[in-house]
Image: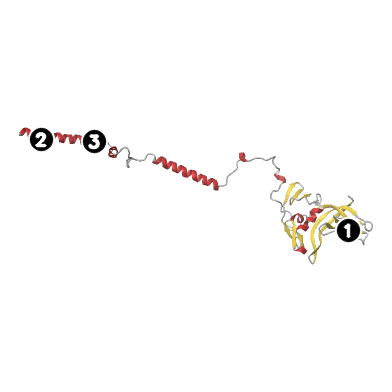
C-alpha cells in the first residue's frame, strides 16, 4: 500500500515538475506572443495581425501618382515659356526699328469739320516711308524739307468712306494724317480766267482748261492752291502742268450736304512743267 502511494506521489511530483519546466521554457521558445499565434495559423492564410510590409510602398506609389497627375494638370493650365532653343527662324532677322507692328496713330487726333476720322492701318517701313492700309506707300515725312508725296489715287481714295450726301461722314486716317502737313504733288494746273496775275489756282489729276476742254475735277482729285507769290497765267484755254509744294489742309466745303471741295493748299510754290 505504501508502495502504491509512494508511486502515486512520485507521479504527481513528476507531473508538477514537467508543468513547471514547460512554463519556464515557453518564453525562450517564443518571446513574441503575437508571433506564436501566427505560427499556429494556417500558412496559406496571411494572419490579420501581421503588418503589410508593402503597405508603405503602395502609399508612396499612390503619392507619386497623385503628384504626377497634379503636374499634368498644371502643365495644361500654366503658360509655358519658349526657350531660345525652341525658336525656329524662318529667315534673316528683321530690323524692327523700322517697323511699327501695332500701327501708327498719326492723324487720329486731327479735327476735321463735318467728319470723323476712321482708323486705318499705318505702318512705318523706312525712315521716310509709310505702308498705308496694305494699298499705298507714302513717301516723305510731312515737313517742308521732306514733304509727303501722295499720289492722286491716294487722295481720291477719301471717297471710299466720305460722301456726306450719302450719309458717309468718315475721313480715312490715311487722309487725316496729311492735314496740316507739307505735301508735294504734280498735276494739271488751271488759273482764274479773269485775271492776268494771280495767287490762286487749281492743281488736278485730269486735263481741264477751266471751261470747256477736258474733264472737270471732283473734290477728290483737285486741290485749291494759294500761292506765296503771284504768277502770270497762260493764254486763255491753255492746259499747263506743274508741281506744287505747300501745306495741305483737309477742309470739306459743303453746300446742303453736297461736297464741293475737300483739299486746300496754303503757302504754295509752283514749279511749271514736268
Residue at the image point whose x is 45% and y is 43% from the top:
63
Query: Mark 2 or mark 3, which is nearer to you?
Result: 2
Q: Nearer the viewer, residue 45 or 261?
A: 45
Query: Mark 2 or mark 1, which is nearer to you?
Result: 2
- In this view, 123 is above or below 219: above
Q: Nearer the viewer, residue 15 or 104?
A: 15
Task: Please name the residue that numbered disc 1 is placed on.
Answer: 199
**How far apart are labels 1 and 3 at the CA level?**
134 Å
| Horizontal relation, residue 25 to residue 140: left or right | left
Label 1 environment density (alpha carbons within 10 Å; few <14, some 14–19, many ≥20): some
Q: Nearer the viewer, residue 265 or 45?
A: 45
Q: Name which quarter of the figure residue 188 lies in.
A: bottom right
Query: Mark 1 or mark 3, which is nearer to you?
Result: 3
Q: Position of residue 26 (x, y in %)?
A: 23, 36
**Residue 8: which disc?**
2
**Residue 26: which disc?**
3
Quarter occupied by the N terminus: top left
**How far apart are labels 2 and 1 at the CA level?**
160 Å
Taking the view exactly as shown, the residue that stands out farthest to the right is 235
**Residue 273: which disc?**
none
Q: Position of residue 10 (x, y in %)?
A: 11, 33
Q: Secondary structure at mark 1?
A: strand
Residue at the image point whose x is 7% and y is 34% from the top:
4
Q: Secondary structure at mark 2?
A: helix
Precedes in sequence: disc 2 or disc 3: 2
> Total label count?
3
Precedes in sequence: disc 1 or disc 3: 3
Residue at the image point whose x is 50% and y is 46% from the top:
70
Q: Position of residue 57 (x, y in %)?
A: 41, 40
Q: Name which quarter of the figure residue 224 lies in.
A: bottom right
Q: Secondary structure at mark 3?
A: helix
Amino acid at each position: 500500500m505504501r508502495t502504491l502511494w509512494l508511486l502515486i506521489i512520485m507521479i504527481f511530483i513528476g507531473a508538477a515538475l514537467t508543468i513547471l519546466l514547460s512554463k519556464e521554457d515557453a518564453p525562450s521558445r517564443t518571446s513574441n506572443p503575437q508571433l506564436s499565434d501566427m505560427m499556429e495559423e494556417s500558412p496559406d492564410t496571411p494572419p490579420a495581425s501581421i503588418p503589410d510590409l508593402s503597405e508603405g510602398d503602395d502609399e508612396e506609389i499612390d503619392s507619386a501618382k497623385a503628384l504626377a497627375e497634379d503636374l499634368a494638370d498644371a502643365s495644361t493650365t500654366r503658360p509655358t515659356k519658349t526657350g531660345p532653343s525652341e525658336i525656329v527662324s524662318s529667315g534673316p532677322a528683321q530690323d524692327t526699328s523700322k517697323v511699327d507692328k501695332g500701327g501708327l496713330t498719326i492723324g487720329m487726333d486731327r479735327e476735321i469739320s463735318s467728319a470723323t476720322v476712321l482708323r486705318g492701318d499705318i505702318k512705318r517701313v523706312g525712315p521716310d516711308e509709310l505702308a498705308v492700309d496694305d494699298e499705298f506707300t507714302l513717301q516723305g515725312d510731312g515737313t517742308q524739307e521732306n514733304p509727303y508725296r501722295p499720289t492722286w489715287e491716294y487722295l481720291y481714295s477719301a471717297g471710299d468712306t466720305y460722301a456726306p450726301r450719302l450719309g458717309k461722314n468718315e475721313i480715312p486716317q490715311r487722309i487725316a494724317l496729311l492735314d496740316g502737313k507739307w505735301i508735294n504733288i504734280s498735276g494739271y494746273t488751271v488759273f482764274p480766267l479773269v485775271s492776268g496775275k494771280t495767287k490762286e489756282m487749281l492743281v488736278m489729276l485730269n486735263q481741264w482748261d477751266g471751261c470747256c476742254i477736258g474733264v472737270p475735277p471732283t473734290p477728290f482729285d483737285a486741290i485749291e492752291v494759294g500761292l506765296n507769290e503771284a504768277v502770270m497765267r497762260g493764254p486763255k484755254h491753255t492746259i499747263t502742268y506743274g508741281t506744287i509744294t505747300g501745306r495741305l489742309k483737309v477742309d470739306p466745303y459743303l453746300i446742303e450736304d453736297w461736297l464741293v471741295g475737300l483739299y486746300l493748299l496754303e503757302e504754295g510754290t509752283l514749279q511749271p512743267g514736268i
